[in-house]
């Protein structure tokens, strides 16, 4: 199956011109598929795929993750069905119903604590710049880590972002993030570049290469732990917090949709439910005759 997956990935890259983030996601999903069966897709039945989905459920993966993997599998089988006249065994296999959960957000006080980083090293300045920018502009983690030094315009306080489907948008940067970025870009980033390994990615790891998602995840979790923030936190938590706080402070949903790069307003409207929950909690906590 590995050769079949390789052919499909090349098709997605060359013919469909999908982004590298999408390609990497397909590779990860299909690697699980390949390891489970270890045989040609010609010898896989619909029942086999159903068993594979059950195996994913037993791994305690959530419905959204399983649906993502299933989408990658469907794409693989669709390709070979179209190009090699093979039966498409994924037809009729439905995605799992996803239970709607509201995104976890930090309070404004918790964000202030998280971003109050005492900078004693180049890594501290880098980490502060990453977190300040993510909260300031509501970026996805993939968007943040794909930024290059030419995407940031400190003179005009804007950043050029390439979102899902390689769609470009221009997002403003707040003053706190601008100051943190200026310090990092002009004084600290060069110290992270290793001899012979120059690249133009904005945020670099200690090897002088592009910061990874897992690397960022470890950084934000450690900082949250050091700051005494008890909530479960992920890179996306800052994006959710950005949108929720914007709404709380009076921004309209349409503006938030543009800033987040959401294609559909229905995706953005989830933050109205978050705000309603926060209002209810404040009412329950503080009304004298609740």
Image (spheres, helix red, strand yellow):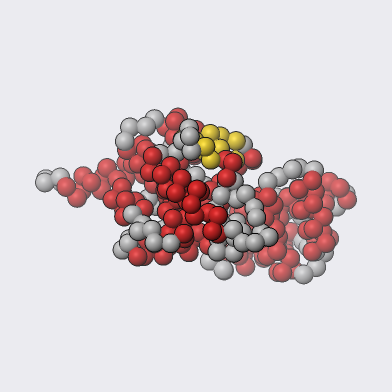
122 or 263, which is in the foreground? 122
Side of 157 where 199 appears, left or right: right
Q: Residue at x 27, y 42 (%)?
A: 279
The image quadrant that residue 193 belongs to is: bottom right
215 or 87, which is in the foreground? 215
Is residue 236 depicted above or below 168 in this figure?
below
The image quadrant that residue 118 belongs to is: bottom left
Side of 55 where 261 appears, left or right: left
Q: Residue at x 40, y 39 (%)?
A: 174
Q: Residue at x 23, y 46 (%)?
A: 282
Image x and y of residue 41, in percent: 80, 61
Image x and y of residue 86, in percent: 85, 52
Side of 117 where 19 appears, left or right: right
Side of 50 where 266 appears, left or right: left
The image quadrant that residue 36 belongs to is: bottom right
Q: How many marks do you count on the picture?
A: 0
Q: Residue at x 74, y 68 (%)?
A: 37
């Amino acid at each position: 199956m590995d050769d079949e997956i390789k052919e499909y990935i090349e098709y997605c890259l060359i013919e469909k011109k999908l982004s590298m983030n999408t390609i990497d996601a397909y590779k990860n999903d299909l690697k699980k598929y390949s390891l489970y069966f270890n045989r040609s897709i010609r010898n896989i039945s619909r029942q086999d795929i159903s068993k594979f989905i059950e195996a994913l459920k037993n791994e305690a993966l959530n419905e959204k993750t399983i649906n993502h993997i299933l989408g990658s599998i469907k794409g693989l089988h669709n390709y070979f069905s179209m190009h090699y006249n093979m039966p498409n065994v994924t037809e009729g296999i439905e995605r799992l119903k996803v239970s709607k959960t509201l995104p976890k957000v930090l309070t404004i006080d918790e964000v202030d604590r998280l971003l109050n980083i005492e900078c004693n090293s180049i890594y501290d300045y880098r980490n502060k710049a990453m977190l300040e920018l993510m909260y300031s502009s509501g970026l996805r983690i993939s968007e943040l880590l794909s930024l290059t030094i030419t995407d940031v315009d400190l003179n005009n306080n804007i950043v050029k972002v390439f979102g899902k489907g390689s769609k470009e948008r221009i997002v403003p940067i707040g003053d706190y993030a601008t100051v943190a970025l200026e310090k990092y870009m002009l004084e600290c980033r060069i110290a992270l570049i290793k001899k012979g390994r120059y690249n133009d990615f904005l945020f670099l790891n200690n090897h002088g290469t592009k910061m990874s998602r897992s690397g960022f995840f470890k950084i934000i979790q450690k900082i949250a732990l050091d700051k005494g923030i008890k909530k479960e936190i992920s890179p996306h938590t800052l994006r959710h917090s950005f949108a929720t706080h914007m709404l709380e402070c009076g921004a309209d949903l349409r503006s938030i949709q543009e800033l987040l790069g959401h294609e559909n307003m229905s995706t953005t409207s989830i933050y109205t439910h978050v705000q309603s929950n926060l209002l209810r909690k404040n009412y329950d906590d503080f009304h004298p005759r609740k």
